[in-house]
Amino acid sequence: MALELDARQRAMLEEMHVRVWWPQAPAAVEQPTPQAVPAAAAISEPISAPIPAPVPAPAVVARATPAVAPPAPAPQPARPAVAPADDGRAAAIAAMDWPALQQSVAGCEACKLCGTRKNTVFGVGPTAPQADAPPRVDWLIVGEAPGEQEDLRGEPFVGQAGKLLDNMLRAVGVSRHGEVRGAQAAFIVNVLKCRPPGNRNPALDEVAQCEPFLKRQIALLQPRIILAVGRFAVQSLLAGSVPDVQTQPLGRLRGKVYRYEGVPVVVSYHPAYLLRSLPEKAKAWADLCLAMETVKAVESP
Ligand code: URA
């Protein structure tokens, strides 16, 4: 498998400190410049960091554990499975169309976060062809919860983490507005539609109350791929299909394609974590390549 990357995309990756190997530019005229980059060759080699040994990234087409096992991650606290929200409310949300769903999120008072939020954050994506229909999207990116900036603006991933997310998506030809010619369109949402005060972790009851919104968004958008970034997104989406997802470190869940209501799901790190951990960026790049390959496979089985 090879991923086509043009010079602009390569420059973007370099800027993000995601180093992707490709053959050197030819010295002789007869040698053509390679067009295809083996995506599996993504390596973590921060440009300025004095780390000699590259961190292994999983082979992009592999659906299993990377060839070289990464160091054992620190154990994570067990989280019990999310309790389902009230059945009547969940059933009502499951029957909503797109405008009703937007209204329902905007006026939601199902948990205490409504008392501290400035804005609800429904999600963002390309403009829908009709006002009362969901937009057509290829990718759905699921994050954790709005932060301070997102709460103020009512839009997900507008801070530094969002910039990195946008850059990484753009490098594989995906855009949250679908505005770039030929780009695949992404819709971006969070598990929680309201900001937890002080950016604390989402609480179980908050996730449970918001879960029907996410489920309905997915049912209406019908994305071709879901990229779950960070452990709250991963736990929410895989709780029904991966029995020990609450206790598995995220790193162990990567590199495989899961399903949520029939839609393929790829697991990756949260962009805010990537901002703090340069070596993991190469792994996130491999995750993006896996997602891209999955979309292509759905396109042409
Ligand atoms: N982190 C998230 O998970 N979502 C946002 O919208 C912003 C930061």
Image (cartoon, grey):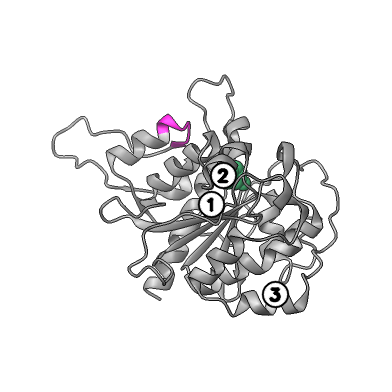
From the image, state whether disc 2 or disc 3 is nearer to you: 3
Q: Residue furthest left?
A: 29
Q: Which mark is residue 189?
A: none
Location of mark 1 (residue): 287
Q: Position of residue 91 (x, y in %)?
A: 68, 79
Asked if residue 269 can be seen in this view, the reply is no
In the image, 172 versus 92, the foreground residue is 92
Determine the residue positioned at 65% across, 78% down.
92
What amino acid type is highlighted by mark number 1?
Answer: Asp
Classify mark 2: residues with Cα within 10 Å, few (<14), some (14-19) or many (20+).
many
CA separation, marks 2 and 3?
36 Å
CA separation, marks 1 and 2?
6 Å
Helix, strand or loop status at disc 2: helix
Q: Position of residue 69 (x, y in %)?
A: 68, 46
Location of mark 2 (residue): 283
Q: Which mark is residue 90?
A: 3
Q: Position of residue 53 (x, y in %)?
A: 59, 29
Q: Position of residue 65 (x, y in %)?
A: 65, 56
Quadrant placement of the C terminus: bottom left
Q: Image check: 210 left or right of 217?
A: right
Instruction: Using the rendered view, name the quadrant where residue 273 is placed.
Output: top right
Determine the residue positioned at 62% across, 31% down.
276
The number of numbered badges drawn on the structure is 3
Magenta range: 14-19
Quick check: marks 1 and 3 in contact, CB under 8 Å? no
